[in-house]
Amino acid sequence: NNHQIFRLLPEYDFPAWRGFLDHLGASMHPSWHFGYFDRDAYPLAMSANCELIRSGAGPLPFWVTELQGGSNNYSGMNPLTPTATEIAQWVWTSIASGARGLIFWTLNPRSVGFEAGEWGMIDWQGQPTDRLEMAGRITACLAAHPGLAQARPQFDPIHLLYSSETMALQDLWEMDGGDVRQTFAARQSGGHIKSLLAHYQAMLESGITPQIAGLHEFDWENHGRDHTLILPNMTVLPRAYHQPLRDYVARGGKLVLTGQSGHLDEYRYNTFQGDAPLAELLGGHLLELRVQGDRFETRVEGQPLLAHYLQGVIEPATGAIAGEAPNGTVTALRHTYGQGETLWVPAPLGLAVWGESSPALAAFWRREVSLPSQPVRLAGHYPGLMIRQLQAGNTTYTVLVQTDSPARTLRFDAPGLRPEVVFQSGAGQILDKRSVHLGPASVLVLRWAAKE
């Protein structure tokens, strides 16, 4: 029942736990564990948290073994009373992310001590709250649609990787105190995972569903052609992964590095200095990283993107220039290696837009990743939308979650299929076979059936 996953991830070695567990659980209390996120991004946090646990569990099923069910005023970092719709958003996001079960903390409010009167889904007079009633509605829906209860999450062949070593280093090297006059997210605890999460958000808002995994969890032997690996601002890349990266790209995979990725090894040696071990793979050498400011513009093949803090200066060798600064400095490189390719952008792209939607970053990923054909796919980019899809046999289910975004129409590509509503909380309706209207603070679960 691990917790605070976005901060404590380096302390957990989930693969080592698989030998003595038959399930992996996780505590997901937004008021305790989602301090990096604004409240309207809690569904995004829930999805990413589930991804981290799903990857850690490997072949084992995972549960959300603690999900906040009620109010807290003292016993929470950021106290809140979940709305009934938020309960629906968190539960459906967990289900769509692959959780095989959920346990609320708690049914009855605690009676004494630090949590007295808090957390319950039943009020102080023993009556069900609207939160408990919402949980009952979801349970009834799952009972009425057994195919949905058995459906498994759909993923695209895209993998956002993290390194526990980078997270630990950022905790250790964070600078604070009265003499610090410039604060940059890349220098602070959480810089690596926030960068990953910003890319994750940009993809989800476009209907692209990547997987998240640790370097130590990723199946290096069975991925290659048509897959994309992303190392987002991964400052520490242990040397043990250099050869697996080369082999993966040589087999036909695509590798994208952003920010400080690969700067240090596990002993904190600058691996780009001198005879750089990744130069052949990336097609050039990194000359230095130059401090720019909190946000600045960089370009990849003419497309502007916001970047944060550092701009890498590249000396091309065999790679093709993919980005240049106005003064001619090379800032991005594309390279063919074996049957695959690499794209190297040594500037933190995710941290520049952390906590907000970025149409430019979303468009960048739509250009860069190869998406397989799927029965149902979102058409376009919708800022603030959380979408997950599940598959059960030939049936596709779509879970749509919207927090404070204004009402809008979503369009889908779903040849030969039509949507029908399975569950709804808040405003939403099907407009036609390709379009759905979704209001703010809403959840809509769709089942796609063959058109008659």
Image (cartoon, rainbow, N blue to C red):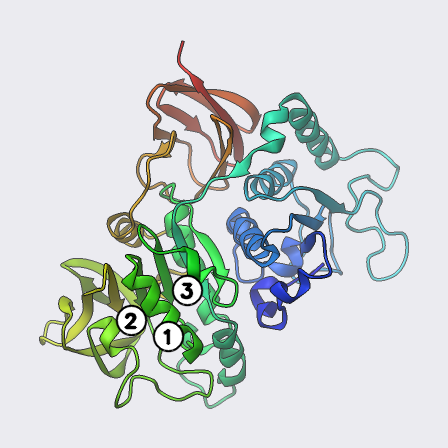
Q: Nearer the viewer, residue 338 or 234?
A: 338
Residue at horizontal 41 percent and vertical 61 percent from the top: 354
Q: Residues within 10 Å of mark 2 (few under 14, many from 20)?
A: many
Q: Residue furthest right?
A: 112
Which residue has dot 2 on it? 347
* Residue 372 picture location, percent across and down: 33, 40
Label ID, residue 195: 3
Q: Compare marks 1 and 2 and give the one earlier in the sequence.
A: 1
Query: Residues under labels 1 and 3: Cα distance?
Result: 21 Å
* Residue 229 picture location, percent across and down: 36, 59
Q: Nearer the viewer, residue 392 or 397?
A: 392
Q: Compare marks 1 and 3 and give the one earlier in the sequence.
A: 3
Residue at horizontal 36 percent and vertical 61 percent from the top: 230
Q: Residues within 10 Å of mark 1 (few under 14, many from 20)?
A: some
In this rendering, position of residue 136 left or right of residue 315: right
* Residue 378 picture location, percent across and down: 36, 35
Q: Amino acid at mark 3?
A: Ser
Label ID, residue 121: none
Q: Residue furthest top?
A: 452
Q: Amino acid at mark 2?
A: Ala
Q: Compare marks 2 and 3 and give the one earlier in the sequence.
A: 3
Vertical order, 417 against 52 (above or below): above
